[in-house]
Amino acid sequence: MNDSFSRRALPPILPTSMRFLCLLFSLLIGSSAFAQSNSQSGTPRFDGHSWWNYVEILADDNMEGRNTGSEGLKRAEAYIVEQLQADRLQPAGTDGYYQPVKLISRRTLEADSSLALFRDGKSELLSFEKDAYFSNRFSQAPKVDAPLVFVGWGLDIPEKGYNDLQGLDLKGKVAVVLYGGSPSEIPGPLSAHYNDIKQRWAALKKAGAIGIIAILNPHSMDIPWDRLKMLRTQVGMAPADETLDDTAGIELGVAFNPASADKLFAGSGHTFQEISDLAKARKPLPRFPLKVEIRARAKVDVQHLESSNVVAKLEGSDPELKKDCVVMSAHIDHLGIGEPINGDKIYNGAMDNGSGSAMLLDFARSFKENLPTFKRSVILLWITGEEKGLLGSRYFAEYPTVPASSIVANINTDMFLPIIPLQVVTVYGISESDLGEWAAKMAKQHGIEAQGDPKPQRNSFIRSDQYNFIRKGVPAVAMAVGCKLDTPQQKVIDEWLQNHYHAPSDDTHQPVNLETAGKFEGLVLDLLAFTANSEKAPDWKPDSFFKRFVQH
Ligand SMILES: [Zn+2]
């Protein structure tokens, strides 16, 4: 931990007299509605230390990387519940603070499985380490022998009259897709939505395809293949309730190393270099049948398990508005114990997402010490199964523990990365709703610049739990410490993603910037307070693509 930035701006717990002075001061200088709402709620300031203490507990080796369904995650959640009891927050799960979620896990038994390409009567075995592996996220049929068709980006986007599947015969075949991204003509939110596996699989299934081989887009991969191949042995999970399984019916789901992709293109008249160059320029891609077939044999070990979301409630103060709930969420699960890197096999998940989970605990603590009077009720939600495909939030959104219609907003934070000075905050969904607009205004008041997703091709808006709220029509944002592209700060973030994202080194021995963490917490809490106190609940922008999900 790098402590050089931990200069305390204000003590986290102010004596009452000082709090009064702060209130007076902010009333005097705060001319806008935002500042007044801030001071009304008396939101406390954070110095990063209390946050870091929670991160150290949640990311301790004793929590064993908090894998979904593991004893380690249960210990972390028991700790959270203990704190909530002490902080006198109401339980709002189905079993006290807990909302159990039934899941199944899948693991391909590689010793009894194989992937091969078949051409001209000959079969070429693929290496799980070097070429391609079964993705444990999907159910796999024991045997798939099928022709392959390259479907480019593999996107079907009716809003843009764009369809990569059009005119191709996919019946009974496996679609080979360049996975992750879209041509530049597709706006970010639309691209994010249709990159989601639910939409992808629905379109492919409709076209008659039986499976997907995903060549990972080398221009949008966060994790290099050498590390991905180590993560492949992680169990995959799905909801036990099949109606919530977005990939039900898929017979083959394979991830393919872009460096080996020419094995698929041989004889087709195309090379992967050609595809990759077009992808880099975000142009439409050619689509054509391949000259090879896939021969897949899969043996999958399936287990049943249970893991819980943790839900707490701070009741609102307004007799009418308290029926509304603003959900503040962070996923608590991480990857557990896996392939060792540099002798370390515990994937502690300090930033992913010990950081966000700790922030919620810090909020809970601050509520006790400096009880805010939010007009709306606030739900603090620690989510399980995020790393396994947003499973806990999918379940909560489907079976909320408060009336579905009462949920008016979701603010999510996943891996907010306080590893650089806080000058810019990235607000995923900034232009989509009032909530995005409020986040930007609030940031401005904090002297921080707000930006939308600087790398829309990473599809971050759909890659964390907010997406399940969005799909239910709830305006949502996700927030993280940000930076401008092509700056030294960007380098720090990119380097972190390359080396520490989903690696055992995302632990409590890495440097963090406590001042940034504290300021970020203050900003998010102010947005939460503003949303909880606003006369009007946030709405989607009239032209937002996501407005369509609003349920009437
Ligand atoms: Zn993660």
Image (tube, helix red, strand yellow):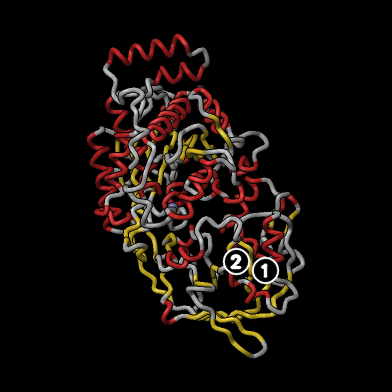
Q: Which residue is mark 2?
A: 215
User: Which amino acid, mark 2?
Assistant: Ile
Most foreground residue, 362 or 471: 362
The residue wearing badge 1 is 272
Q: Secondary structure at mark 1?
A: helix
Question: Residue 376, image x and y in percent?
Answer: 42, 27
Residue 449 position, x and y percent, is 55, 30
Closer to the camera in the image, 153 or 474: 153
Q: Nearer the viewer, residue 40 or 247?
A: 40
The reply to whether callout 1 and callout 2 are in contact (CB within 8 Å) is yes
For label 2, count other residues whose C-alpha is less than 10 Å away and answer few (under 14), some (14-19) or many (20+): many
Q: Position of residue 432 (x, y in %)?
A: 60, 37
If the image is split into quadrants, where does the N terminus sit?
Answer: top left
Does residue 120 sit above or below 160 in this rendering? below
Residue beneath the point at 36% across and 24% down: 9
Residue at (46, 16) in percent of width and height: 36
Lower sequence index among marks 1 and 2: 2
Does dot 2 land on a helix, a strand or a loop? strand
Q: Amino acid at mark 1?
A: Phe
Alpha carbon separation for disc pair 1 and 2: 10 Å
- Does residue 286 appear left or right of residue 526 in this picture? right
Q: Between tags 1 and 2, which lies in front? A: 1
